[in-house]
Amino acid sequence: MIVNATTDGWEIIYHRAHALLAAQLAGQWQRKNAPVRLYETLAAISHHDDLEKEWEQDHLTPAGTPRDFTLITDIDVPMMAQLANNARYRGRWVALLISKHISRLNEPQRGKLAELDEFLDVQIENQQRWQKELGIEREDVDAAYAFMQWCDRLSLILCQQQLPADERWLEISQGPDGRQYSIMQRQDRLINVQPWPFENHQFTVNVEACNLTQVQFHDCQELSQALQQADIKVLEWTFAEN
């Protein structure tokens, strides 16, 4: 989960909600420049964080505060395998993109755990097989995954409150076209991206967040119960070309 401190507690955004925001952003991309198999790619984007189950897992720091996902260092191969396997039920293209996402996040850990190395080898084999079976060029696969990664990164910038103050620009990442994109929030709160990649000149996206007024928790069950009972607020961002 994504954890932001507030004046009286915590703002919690579930990872699945962040993924849905990423899919909203993907749906705004210019149709003429969209990657191949756009709607299946949208499905991969919206489900790429389905392994996160904040209501079941240990998401407390040693101090008893909600633990942001960036503080989690455990390597859970069975959970990653479950995500990869479940993606196959949505089709090989969705499974291919999610498998590439798993690989990108975990390849830097290769060599630390034999079980992980074996799992990563299987992902590479699957990716190569699915690409061949689907008859899609490697460049198209890479462009679609770059698109997925771009939308994921932009969603995280919004959810993690990373927009700089004073109309300063922040680099997002390379898009599917290989170009570098940057984001800036104007004084009137409208958000601009350059170069502008979207279909419409202005649009609004949103995500739901849980508002916790309790700062510390005795155990994970108490945190889970607080999340289920928390007030829900809708966070919105409006993008404008000019």
Image (cartoon, grey):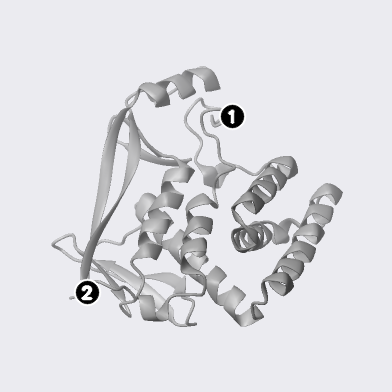
On the image, the x and y values in percent for residue 160 come to: 39, 50
The dot on residue 157 is: none
Single out the mark in the foreground, 2 or 1. Answer: 2
Q: Nearer the viewer, residue 109 or 136?
A: 136
Q: Nearer the viewer, residue 230 or 93?
A: 93
Can you say whether 44 is above or below 173 in the image? above
Q: What residue is drawn where x is 37% and y is 63%?
A: 27
On the image, the x and y values in percent for residue 219 come to: 54, 19
Q: Quadrant of residue 134?
A: bottom right
Secondary-structure class at tag 1 = loop
Q: Measure how far apart labels 2 and 1 are at the Cα level.
A: 41 Å
Q: What residue is drawn where x is 32% and y is 25%?
A: 213
Q: Quadrant of residue 141?
A: bottom right
> Are the residues at dot 2 and dot 1 in contact (C-beta closer than 8 Å)?
no
Q: Nearer the viewer, residue 164 or 117?
A: 117
Q: Nearer the viewer, residue 62 or 197?
A: 197
The local crowd at label 2, few if under 14, some if 14 to 19, many if 20 or more residues have their Cα within 10 Å, is: some
Quadrant showing the C terminus: bottom left
On the image, the x and y values in percent for residue 63 come to: 52, 27
Circle 1 residue: 58
Residue 195 relative to residue 188: left or right:
right
Nearer-N-terminus badge (2/1): 1
Q: Quadrant of residue 30?
A: bottom left
Q: Amino acid at mark 2?
A: Glu
Mark yes or no: residue 239 visible: no
Q: Amino acid at mark 1?
A: Asp
Circle 2 residue: 241
On the image, the x and y values in percent for residue 14 come to: 44, 40
